[in-house]
Image (cartoon, helix red, strand yellow):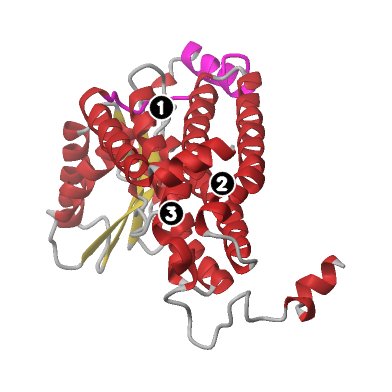
Amino acid sequence: MKSLARFCYSNRRLVLAGWVVLLVGLFALSSAFAGKFRTKFELPDSESARALDLLKERGVSERTGFSGQVVFQANSSVRDEDVRRTMERFFADIQAAVQGVEVVSPYDPERGYQISADGKIAYAELNFSDRQNEQYFDDGETIKEIWREIDQPGLRIELGGDLFIEQSEFSTEFIGIVAAIVILLIAFGSLLAMGLPIGTALFGVGCGVAIIGLLTRLLSVPDFTTQVAGLIGIGVGIDYALLIVTRYRQSLHEGRTPQEAVVLSLDTSGRAVVFAGITVVISLLGMFMMNLDFMRSLALSAVAAVLMTMLASATLLPALLGFVGRNIDRFGLPHRASEAEADIARSFWYRWSR
């Protein structure tokens, strides 16, 4: 680890350029050769699979997919001729635009219970045949477009069910990064010290996400894999970089030169990072024991993210520390004492560890 630390420190420009080229190159390859995410789970020996087989035997397998609801309210009555004409046209347009959907209308003679007692509210059920998750949401958008074109005074129509869930404006990865920035800023009290773990993790996760895109060409990768692997990668990447940066700051405060601090940090905390990364990889590979295709691809994707963040912590971070040097505590928070100024022996954590 000492030789690696010295190389990355002495050739920091080359190491940084190499990581930039690697990140751009992987994303270019992913854009050119990536396949499609396929979210279809098959559990051949499960009770749910036997239930689906039974539905197929009884001839009702065409309704084993997602479902949705169309709820509508009329000021007068849902049985009003104008309202009924509008809704039946809406149902017909849905069936014409979306393949494999069954509309269970409240206007069917046997479905009177789908109309409220006062006759002002009713609902229709949308039953879909089994398909890929991406197709479900595409069909949901198609139905929304038809729905938006309806404009009849005194008639209110709402859509419900999994197909019409509104996606969050902010991704889970974004929320996780913002939370990490706040926590690290409070812990370190310095913008530079906070930025190093975040930047290292983003490089590693970025490369991991690009590799996941390439895996879609070879494996059946679920569409939520990027989010899961990204969150795991961000978590371990920040954690690994945090260990090294903390040791680096302590070494500087003890009077070592920046190069000596980098070498010592990677030789101590860096070894712990490599060991921890290998442990996480072994744990993730345990998902192969579940004997499910989508779990295997999920495990490999998470492994890619962890390995890339571990590699970034062991190579890119020492190079970045070489650029930062003794300025690690610059741009600090107001009224925040550094570790060199604080009386560590009086701190709560020091007393707790004793």
Q: Compared to 288, does 23 lie above or below? A: below
Q: Residue furthest right?
A: 354
> Which kind of residue does numbered mark 2 sit on?
Val
Of labels 1 and 3, earlier in sequence is: 1
Q: Which residues are the magenta region?
A: 34-57
Residue 132's disc number: none
Q: Quadrant of the C terminus?
A: bottom right
Disc 3 to disc 2, how far (Cα)? 22 Å
Residue for badge 2: 236
| Viewer can see residue 309 | no
Q: Is residue 24 left or right of residue 215?
A: left
- Secondary structure, mark 3, is helix
- At a point 59% along the width and 16% down the height, the residue shown is 50
Left or right: 12 with respect to 153? right
> 19 and 225: which one is in front?
19
Mark 3 or 2, closer to the camera: 3
Q: Residue at x 41, y 27 (%)?
A: 63
Per the image, the residue denoted by label 1 is 63
Residue at image position (78%, 81%) is 346
Mark 2 lies on a secondary structure that is helix
Q: What x and y, as percent, mark residue 58? A: 49, 14
- The percent coordinates of residue 241 (x first, y second) are 54, 51
Q: Is disc 1 surrounded by few (<14), some (14 to 19) or many (20+) residues within 10 Å?
A: some
Few, some or many residues within 10 Å of mark 3 (<14, 14–19, 20+): many
Residue tagged 3: 322
Where residue 41 appears, as percent x and y from the top left, is 49, 24
Spatial distance from mark 2 to mark 1, Cα to Cα? 42 Å
Report how far apart the C-alphas of labels 1 and 3 lie in the structure.
61 Å
